[in-house]
Amino acid sequence: MQTPWDQRIARVLVRRLARTPITPNQLTAVTVLVAFVAAALFATGDPTYVNVAAGLFVLSRFLDHFDGELARLKSMSSRLGYYFDYLAGAGSYSALFLGIGIGLANGPLDTWGWVLGWAGAASAVISLFINLGIDRARTRLAAGRPEKDAVGYPSIAGFELEDGIYLLAPITWLGFILPFFVAAAIGATVYTLVSAIQLIRLQRA
């Protein structure tokens, strides 16, 4: 499988951090903090803050690749880091959905902002446990180590499905955050259902 472009870039940029005391888990914590700040700005509903939030969240998801690469460079891979990374991703996306939902609930979406926000947030949390289950099932089938590789996403030409989150920034800046949010919340729910089916199939294998 071709290494995603964002991961390749992170692999190059993170080399300077390998000579510092910074640890992979510290980087993971930073990505979560940036994501939560972005979610809080989205919740304000203020156009200026929302535009800044979009940029911050995209930055957070890009930085998410740094911890794993740093762990490899410093030989600091650990079970704690493995689970922390999963938890950080789920927490970041949950905060994103809630933040955007709250911001839009005070505007055009009204109550639906809350409904879609909670649906997206719940999907992110549920997907956390489903993906961990998929990872364990694949590990059992491959007789490998669970902390070595995370669950993979469909990819093509060096771009993964999750890379679609990078579109959040330009879409928000162009004023299309509402349709993007609605589509993302529905898509997250569908993804969770598909992942659950995949887990069931793997467990039966």
Image (spheres, helix red, strand yellow):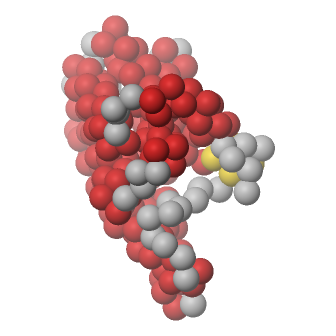
Specify whether 125 is left or right of 67: left
User: Horizontal and vertical percent for residue 90?
Assistant: 34, 50
Classify the position of the C terminus by image quarter: bottom right
Quadrant (top left, top right, bottom left, bottom right) of the N terminus: bottom right
- Please indicate, yes or no, whether residue 71 appears anywhere in the rendered image: yes
Q: Quadrant of residue 202?
A: bottom right
Q: Position of residue 145 (x, y in %)?
A: 49, 72
Label tally: 0
Q: Is residue 80 above or below residue 74?
A: below
Q: Which residue sits furthest top?
A: 48
Image point (34%, 54%), residue name: 81
Q: Could one spot residue 90 in this view of the protein?
A: no
Left or right of 60, for residue 65: right
Residue shown at 31% from the left, 27% from the top: 34
Q: Position of 128 compared to 8: left or right?
A: left
Q: Is residue 87 above or below residue 129?
A: above
The percent position of residue 170, horizontal first and vertical second, equals 54, 20
Q: Is residue 98 above or below residue 132?
A: above
Q: Quadrant of residue 41?
A: top left
Q: Residue furthest right?
A: 157
Residue located 46% across and 44% down the image: 74
User: Which one is in front, 162 or 75?
Assistant: 75
Pick the residue in front: 58 or 149.
149
The residue most toward the front is 19
Residue at the image position 43 percent from the left and 41 percent from the top: 67
Q: Residue furthest bottom?
A: 204
Q: Is residue 100 above or below residue 78?
A: above
The image position of residue 113, as x and y in percent, is 28, 37
Viewer-closest of 173 and 60: 60
